[in-house]
Amino acid sequence: MSLIELPIISAEETQPARSRKPEWLRVKLPIGEDYKRVRQLVDEYKLHTICQSGNCPNMGECWGAGTATFMILGNVCTRSCSFCAVKTGRPNEYDTDEPARVAEAIKLMRVKHAVITSVNRDELKDRGAEIWYQTVFMVKQMSPQTTIETLIPDVKSNWEALERMISAGQEVVSHNMETVGRLYRLVRPQAKYERSLEQIKRTKAYGKRTKTGIMLGLGETKEEVLKAMDDLVANGCDVLTLGQYLQPTKMHLEVAEFIHPDTFAMYKEEGLARGFDFVESGPLVRSSYHAERHL
């Protein structure tokens, strides 16, 4: 297979030499029959995948293996996080047929482990919890052998909504911290570090396997990353993913630093030593990468 550089920035938008991506940020072209089959199903069922919306560098590998991360509740988010390529605005009315469509597609794709995520729907009283519940419930009804990870948004302390979101039978509940505490105002302006920690803590108390992801290269220090690890373990987080932040467009935050693979390896050792069950740590790691291993 040939290799391409990730299409994060077009040629005419090329940044100064210091921001050019290093050699280790290279991925295989998405090709193959399994990839084509998944692509056709996603298009046919009018599904939103974060794989496409987020320009995920692992889309070829994951889709080639017959897996995908589905994004429910539309493709317009009420948040305006400065790292994210998903559209921001006032979403349309949600589609009540979406849970059935997602469940049917997962059955047709013969997915062994499904990852489901969503945009933030802050304008909804229940934060979209009922659609979340129905989607997981229908997937389990149609594909009882399929295990599920749900990557859920910040419920803004609506703990009743959280309980509904996570009570339909999914095996893993993930909520991404995204960055260290100091950078929240810059990276996740509508979120709060302590509130996300509490959401993970409550999810663990409910009896679920918990997971989170942090992007590196936004200007955080080693000490801040290690403190975030300590905070997460103290709040009951089981699985941690660490990956390189990549700028989706020139309108988004610039990359402060390209983290070397050796540093990612060091963070993996640090995380495991602190008590995480799993730590996925590498430049191209995204929160759903190798998700089937995190059960």
Image (cartoon, helix red, strand yellow):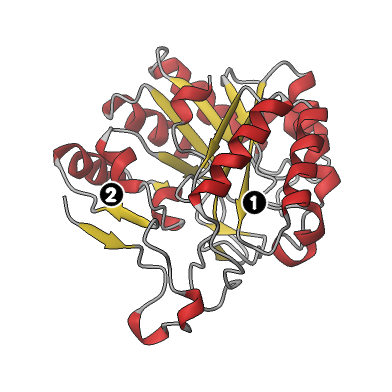
Distance from the alpha carbon under mark 1 to that under mark 2: 23 Å
Question: Of label 1 and label 2, which has the lower sequence position?
Answer: 2
Q: Characterize the local packing of mark 1: few (<14), some (14-19) or many (20 or more) Cα atoms within 10 angstroms.
A: many
Whether residue 225 is visible here, answered yes or no, is yes
The residue wearing badge 1 is 120
Q: Check disc 1 and report its element: helix, strand or loop.
A: loop
Q: Is residue 135 left or right of residue 59?
A: right
Q: Where's residue 180, x and y in %? A: 75, 52
Q: Which residue is mark 2?
A: 43
Q: Position of residue 208 (x, y in %)?
A: 67, 19
Q: Amino acid at mark 1?
A: Asn
**6 lies left or right of 195:** left
When the figure is inspected, residue 157 is found, relative to residue 244, above or below; the finding is above
Q: Image point 40% across, 29% down: which residue?
A: 103
Q: Position of residue 128 (x, y in %)?
A: 65, 42
Residue 57 location in percent, x, y? Answer: 38, 53
Quadrant of res 2: bottom left
Quadrant housing residue 62: top left
* Residue 235 is at least partly visible in this image: no
Seen as rendered, the residue at the extreme bottom is 12
